[in-house]
Every structure is written in C-alpha cells, then in structure tokens.
Image: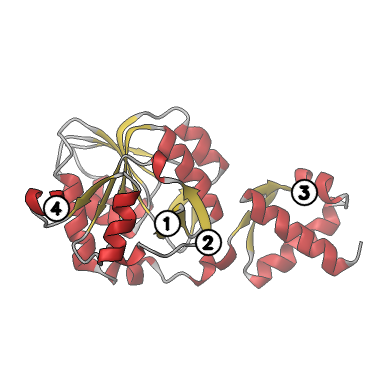
Amino acid sequence: MLVEKRRQRVLDLVSERGFIALTDLAQAVQASESTLRRDLDYWHQQGALRRTHGGAIYVGDSATLPALEERAAAQRDEKQAVAKAAVARMRDGDAVLLDGGTTTLEVARLLVGRPMQIVTNSLPIAALFANSHETDLVILGGYVYPKTGVALGPLTVRMLDEIHVHQAVLSIGGVTAKGLFNSNLLLVETERQMLRSADEVVVVADHTKIGRPALAFLCDFAAVDTFITDNGLSSDQRRLLEQSEVRLIVADETTEEQQL
C-alpha cells in the first residue's frame, strides 16, 4: 500500500471511531505498529489527531475552535438568560450532570451554593464547586481536551455507565431538522452516554446554534426531552424547534407567549 493511501486510511479509521488503539489499527490496516506510529506522528503534527499512550484520538476541525474564554464571551447575555431558565427547573437535592459547554458553564455558576449533586466532565465547572460545602461533586475522568478542559473518550464513557442523574444538561454546536450536532467526534460519543444516564435530557443553546449543523451528529430530537433557548429566535428557528415536538422553553418569554 502506498504511503499516502495508508496514511489516509489511518486518518479515516481514527475519524470514524473517535479513538482507536494501536493494536486495533494495526489489525485493520495490516501494517506494523512501528509504521503506524510514524503515520500517527504525521497526522499529530498536522493537527488532525492527538497521539495518546497506545493509540490516537481524533481532533479534526475542532482544532480551529476558539478558546473557551472567547466562546464564553460570545452571546454571553443570551447564555445567561438560558442558564437562568434552566436552573429555575431544578430542585435542591437533585443530581444534575453538566457537560463542558459554555452555556452549561453559566448554568453551573448559578448552582454554586445550592445543596445538589453535580456530575461533570468539565474542569472549569468542577473548579466552581471544588470548595463548596453544600454541593456533592463528582468529576468524570478521561482524556482532557486541552482547549476546553473537558474529559472525554472511552474512560469517561465507562464511568458514565455507573452514573444516574435526574437531569443531564448538555450544550451543542448546532441543530437542524435532522437533529443535534457537536464539534468533536469523541465528545459526541461521550455525550451519547450522558443521554442514557439521565431521567430527563435538557439541551441549552442560544439561538445562533439553531439552523446550522456542526462536525459530528449527536442525536435526533427523540433523545431530548427539553430544549431551552433565548428569545432571539427568528420565526424559522422557532418553527424548526416546534416541529421537532421537543418541549421548548424560551427564556424571558411569558407562559402566554410560549403558548402562542
């Protein structure tokens, strides 16, 4: 097999699986592990994947994502309004799982000091509760994506097998009529396990995410119970969400407005 063809096959496999062990890669490509280490090094240098001990994790175009601080600053007012609406539905004593998005970070800020159980794969969110005497904190481990401080991958998925919560609150990279998307294949695999860990799945997203896809498909609307967004919705965006039949909550709208 030509070098270029083999390298492309390697990248395709890592992309499809999100994470692949070197031994599995060698079996799939029918090449030696030493050869494949060089191929993985090549793609690591190109920024397409990240080498790990014994394998590789797909990065893809998520390497072009703005840093967490920059993304958190975008639509901050809208995210805070969405977060306030989400927190209003939570009760003291609830067990809540928060993923590592910037909108869920705003949710977490409003929960500090409340007597709850918080489960998260986000280091920035965990840091908010680390010294809280009122909150029980569970941190999910795994490979930590350096741009966002979020743990993801096979280890995180295995830990989620042992977790059950009242609500899983997830942020997303985009939503279309097809369903929900996010920006990282390995993150999507982790979030799918989060969906299975909760009595209620709540998606929090500002209106700019609605009507556009992202790199990786997460799930269809049937997997989501409640979608919370801000009142910057256009008529087309509102129609898209209403046709999905998911429970829609628009922050800062009155009950009468939401029933129209």
Which quadrant is home to the N terminus? bottom right
Sequence-wise first label, 4 or 3: 3
Count residues near mark 2 (Cα–Cα under 10 Å), then give few for <14, some for 14-19, many for 20+.
some
Q: Residue 260's mark? A: 4
* Residue 148 in the figure: left or right of residue 88: right
Secondary structure of the residue carrying numbered label 3:
helix
Mark before the other along the chain sequence, 4 or 1: 1
- Mark 4 vs mark 1: give the one in front: 4
C-alpha span from label 1 to label 3: 27 Å
Q: CA distance from mark 2 to mark 4?
A: 34 Å
Label 1 vs label 2: CA separation?
19 Å
Image side of residue 30 versus residue 19, left or right: right
Which residue sits at x=16%, y=40%? 89
Circle on res. 25: 3
Residue 130 in the image: state x and y as whole percent. Answer: 27, 45
Q: Nearer the viewer, residue 23 or 175?
A: 175
On the image, the x and y values in percent for residue 93 come to 18, 30
| Residue at 32% from the left image edge and 67% from the top image edge | 208
The three-letter amino acid code for the residue at tag 3 is: Leu
- Disc nearer the start of the sequence (2/4): 2
Residue 259 in view in this figure: yes
Tag shown at residue 149: 1
Q: Residue 45 falls in which quadrant of the image?
A: bottom right
